Amino acid sequence: MADQPVPASENAAARVGALAPGFPERGVPIFSSVNRLGLWTLYMKEVRRFFKVQTQTIWAPAMTTLLYLMIFTVALGRDGREVLGVSFASFIAPGLIVMGMMGNAFANTSFNFLAGKIQGTIVDYLMPPLSNGELITGLIGAAVTRAVLVGLAIAAAMLLWPGVSLAVAHPWAVVWFGLMGSAMLATIGLITSVWAEKFDHAAMITNFVITPLTMLSGTFYVIHNLSPTFQAISRVNPFFYVISGFRFGFLGQSDIGDSNMAVLNGAIYVGVLNLVLLGALYVLLKSGWKLKS
């Protein structure tokens, strides 16, 4: 019997197999675990995006935060005023640093999906062979990187202001609360960018949620000066634990509690809250809500 003709598709597959013996069969996934190259590419793409305009994304926040320090120090820190046993400038400096870090982490991720939906480039995030976990890791990792760079820039600028001491008493608290606070706001920013349909929606979250929680978190005061009712409200605010815990890393004192165990409990609270937020974000991405519909 004469040989049957071989379909062109099979010939193409045979040629590919001959050129690349390790090429997988159809339907067999190439990435069986973590797509490290794709994850690194996404991370570097996001880092280069904000670093390309570093004057706006890194140095401008440092200048704005330094103005906060100048204004509040001149208005409230004169005549040798001390808070928690240190000068007023040294008291508010750590809170301003982590406040700048958190705000810029939120700004970085709240732009991602929202800009993609508006500009029609959302497929650049959804089509690459990246799992939801890898997508979250890359975007939040880039936002935390920006937050760290902003924090270093703010700290360098504050060292030029007289009366500011940034001696570190507990390095673990500086690292933990700095990273966890930045990751928390980066996660909230991603959730916002999934939900928002226009830039006004993201601005609404910034103006009516992020800014009030930040300003009422004890950045410029200790909550012991508040009434018991407002002290209880402050202790519900997760931003309070981030800012006070970060300040504890520098000063060795905090208004979270009278013992180091109270600060450790605050650190656990922030870590658990981050896990809850990450779980909620993962569920949103997996459902495709407002991204694939």
Image (cartoon, rainbow, N blue to C red):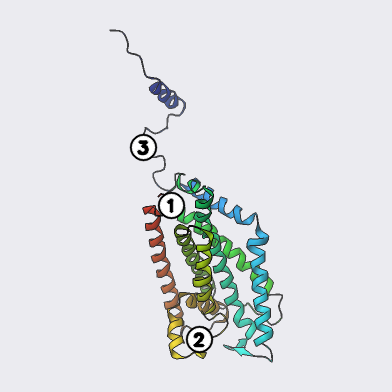
Which of the two discs, 2 and 1, sits closer to the camera?
Answer: 1
Going by the picture, which residue comes out furthest to the top? 1
Residue at left offset 64%, top offset 90% = 81
Q: How would you rate the neighbour count of disc 2 (Cα within 10 Å): few for under 14, some for 14-19, many for 20 or more? A: many
Q: Nearer the viewer, residue 221 or 245?
A: 221
**Residue 197 spot, x, y in % from top left:** 48, 57
Q: Mark 3 and mark 2: span between their CA atoms?
A: 58 Å
Relative height, residue 190 to residue 176 (above, below): above
Disc 3 marks a residue whose amino acid type is: Val
Quadrant of the rendering where the N terminus is positioned: top left
Relative height, residue 207 to residue 284 (above, below): below
**Residue 202 spot, x, y in % from top left:** 51, 63
Q: Nearer the viewer, residue 145 or 250?
A: 145
Disc 1 marks a residue whose amino acid type is: Leu
Q: Nearer the viewer, residue 39 or 186?
A: 186
Of the two numbered discs 3 and 1 on the same chain, state the one appearing first in sequence. 3
Residue at left offset 35%, top offset 14% = 5
Q: Nearer the viewer, residue 118 or 66?
A: 118
Q: Which mark, residue 291?
A: 1
Disc 2 marks a residue whose amino acid type is: Ile
Q: Secondary structure at mark 2?
A: helix
Question: Answer yes or no: do the residues labelled 2 and 1 have beta carbons within 8 Å?
Answer: no
Q: Which residue is mark 2?
A: 223
Going by the picture, which residue comes out furthest to the left? 1
Q: How many marks are shown on the rendered structure?
A: 3
Q: Which mark, residue 28?
A: 3
**Residue 285 spot, x, y in % from top left:** 40, 54
